[in-house]
Image: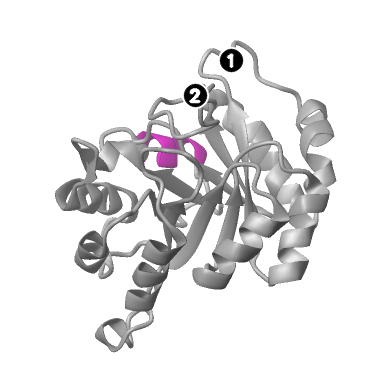
Amino acid sequence: MAVGTIPTVKICGLQSVEVLKSIVHLPIAHIGFVFAPSKRQVTPDKVAELIAYLKSEEVRGQTVPLTVGVFVNPTEEQLTDILAAAPLDVVQLHSQETPAFCMWVREHFGLKVFKSVSISKTEDRIPSLEEVAAQLDPYKGTVDAILLDTFDPVYGGGSGTTFAWDCIPVYQEWARSAGVQLLVAGGLRHDNVDQLVKAYAPDGVDVSSSVETDGVKDIAKITAFVERVTGK
């Protein structure tokens, strides 16, 4: 991301139309819905209801966020069934999905694809550009963004903890050379996201658990996070 450019914001794990109505006016670029097993998992019918609101007369004329479905190793049949019910804008793949699978999603559905890269919170060394390229070069031309997230042994991501941010620049260098966006997730909060933005200037940031209270999305916390990132 160019110096001085404001990162995009993705709020992940939405489950409620009421919450969506309360935040749709904020400068949020992406709203994420979790289809993978999780305490934030939603059904295709619920997401269809949320998407219908974003396309309703009530928000016509506003810049509404793009909708992102978060999946962990889905099959082609599962994706086809879910997207038939819930017409998403982006598919986010959060596990061992292959470059061929990512390309199939882009070509079959005509959607953007985000691919997560899990990083251990105990990582004690920064990978070289050569190592990152060996890992990610096969995904060139198959994804629109990579999402760095803290590894979780159960769900792959969504752990609510940070990873070692000093590894971000090497992934950022790869992303720029590949022409894809670099998004960062993992333990971001309103009181640490400005440090991340100032130091590493990612293209976007992704938050879920830290904008919740007792497992429910908190409007005040979402607003504070968005304001800290965007200044709006």
Q: Residues within 10 Å of mark 2 (few under 14, many from 20)?
A: many
Q: Is residue 34 above or below residue 117?
A: below
As shown in the figure, which amino acid type bears the numbered disc 1?
Answer: Glu
**Marks 1 and 2, the one that precedes in the sequence:** 1
Which residue corresponds to the image point at 60% horizontal and 64% vertical from the top-left? 81
Q: Which residue is mark 2?
A: 163
The residues tagged by marks 1 and 2 sit, at their Cα atoms, a distance apart of: 8 Å
Predominant secondary structure in magenta?
helix
x, y percent for residue 83: 57, 67
Colour pattern of the rendering: one colour
Residue 198: image x %, image y %?
Answer: 42, 40
Q: Is residue 200 above or below residue 51?
A: above
Find out whether residue 15 is within the magenta segment. Answer: no
Dot 2 lies on which element?
loop
Secondary element under disc 1, as helix, strand or loop, is loop
In magenta stretch: residue 195: yes
The foreground one among 48 and 2 is 48
User: What is the quadrant of residue 159 in the picture?
Assistant: top left
Do residues under tags 1 and 2 come within 8 Å of each other at their CB atoms? yes
Question: Is residue 206 toward the left or the right of residue 215 in the image?
Answer: right
Q: Is residue 32 visible?
A: yes
- Residue that carries the numbered disc 1 in the rendered image: 123
Q: Is residue 63 in view?
A: no
Along the line of sight, which residue is nearer the eye, 231 or 36?
36
Q: Amino acid at mark 2?
A: Phe
Q: Which region shows up in magenta? A: 194-200
Q: How many marks?
A: 2
